[in-house]
Image (spheres, rainbow, N blue to C red):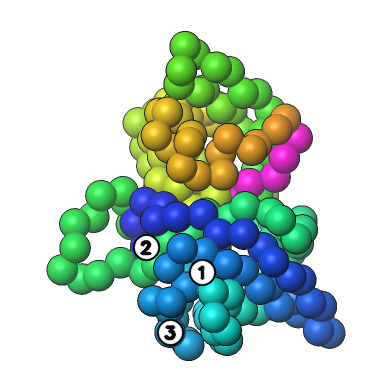
Amino acid sequence: MFTGIIEATGTVEKIEKIGGNINFTLSCPFTNELKIDQSLAHNGCCLTVVEISENQYVVTAIDETLEKTNLGKWQAGSVVNLERCMKMDGRLDGHIVQGHVDKTGEVVAIENRDGSYFITFKYDAAGNFITVPQGSITVNGISLTVAESGDFKFSVAIIPYTWEFTNMKFLKIGDQVNLEFDIIGKYIAKLISKNGIKQI
């Protein structure tokens, strides 16, 4: 379980394809604190640390993960948002994030609004995924508040701190991002669909 509050960014150092899987070697500021079998969210995707060597560690992404996320587009040098799993005695500063990416979205607009940034994303219609204004959404692992919501698109406002200390500042029009929709919203959408209730 995660909160969507990014601890640091890491850098992809090496990519090794093994069958249908890919081993990613990364470096980050807290590599020396990691442990084998530890869960670590990478752009919002929960991966298990399988190897640690000095200031680098290795995680494995299976074929299903590569299909649902933007991990397959990583290259050596890619900057990745990182968050370790939450502690039970800590504050939930973001929202409940599972680290299970639902689908990818596409950046369709980036506006600089006098120091803050307004970014709009679109996503395909498959599945029961919705956003609502002032609701929660996870974009590349970051817990964000939906500013505007439309049919299969939404916008978020990024404060300068988040822009500076995550990989948001590297986004360009057309880039893919990992999306995890709010778990409560997903349950409600599923119940509505299952019971044949018309969505408003």
Alpha-carbon neighbours of circle 3 within 10 Å: few (<14), some, or many (≥20)? some
Q: Main secondary structure of the magenta part?
A: strand
Kind of residue sitting beneath label 2: Phe
| Range shown magenta | 174-179
Q: Quadrant of the C terminus?
A: top left
Q: Which residue is mark 2?
A: 2
- Residue sitting farthest toward the left: 89
For the image shown, how many numbered marks are present on the structure?
Answer: 3
Image point 23% across, 55% down: which residue?
Answer: 92
Query: Whole-percent x and y of residue 154?
Result: 54, 31
Asked if residue 182 can be seen in this view, the reply is no
Q: Which residue is mark 1?
A: 46
Query: Whole-percent x and y of residue 137?
Result: 44, 44
Kind of residue sitting beneath label 1: Cys
Rounded to the nearest angstrom, the CA distance separating label 1 from label 3 is 15 Å
Q: Which residue is mark 3?
A: 35
